[in-house]
Amino acid sequence: MKSDNKLGSIDAYIAQQAEGLRPLLQKIRETIRAQAPEATEKIAYMMPTFWQGENLIHFAAFKNHIGIYPGGEATTAFADRLKSYKTSKGAIQLPLGEPIDYELIADITRWRVEQAKG
């Protein structure tokens, strides 16, 4: 699948990030992959993206956080579990320096896969 920028792949995206971020990003990728085994990996909007008939979820590294982008309804559906995170419509910020809630990422991804199939 053609990507929309020069990164080309999630591997290339992760490789260009700071060394300390790479293991976190790889684990996020593996967490999403485990819940969306049929999804295609691509780069969309300059972010690693999992696509299954539609964009399921994106993630990206920033200076102070990792952004997770599961779409607008996810932040409402998971509002109780997202109270300690900065969110906006369709975006969740996971602060760097705090433990990453991989179980939350897995649950959101599983929910998105069901939505996409629906």
Image (spheres, helix red, strand yellow):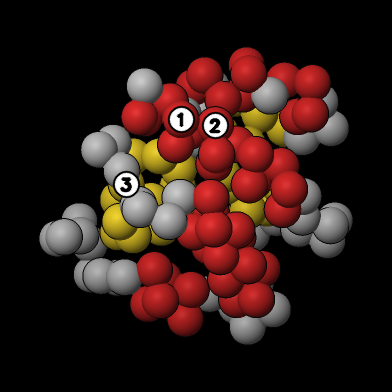
- Residue 105 shown left or right of residue 73 in the figure: right
Q: Work out whether residue 44 or residue 57 is closer to the camera in this orientation and state it.
A: 57
Disc 3 to disc 2, C-alpha distance: 14 Å
Amino acid type of the residue tagged 2 in the rendering: Trp
Q: Work out whether residue 105 or residue 96 is closer to the camera in this orientation and state it.
A: 105
Q: Report the disc number at residue 51.
A: 3
Asked if the residues shown at circle 2 and circle 1 are in contact, with their CB atoms under 8 angstroms apart, the answer is yes
Asked if the residues shown at circle 3 and circle 2 are in contact, with their CB atoms under 8 angstroms apart, the answer is no
Mark 2 secondary-structure assignment: helix
Amino acid type of the residue tagged 1 in the rendering: Glu
Residue at left 45%, top 50%?
36
Residue at left 48%, top 73%?
14
Q: Work out whether residue 70 or residue 38 is closer to the camera in this orientation and state it.
A: 38
Asked if the residues shown at circle 1 and circle 3 are in contact, with their CB atoms under 8 angstroms apart, the answer is no
Please state the horizontal and vertical placement of residue 48, each as a whole percent of the image: 41, 58
* Residue placed under numbered mark 2 in the picture: 111
Residue at left 36%, top 21%?
118
Q: Is residue 28 above or below residue 74?
A: below
Which of the two labelled residues, at mark 3 and mark 2, occupies the earlier sequence position?
3
Tell me if I can see residue 31 in this picture: yes
- The image quarter in which residue 5 lies: bottom left
Q: Report the disc number at residue 79.
A: none
Q: Residues within 10 Å of mark 3 (few under 14, many from 20)?
A: many
Q: Report the disc number at residue 114.
A: 1
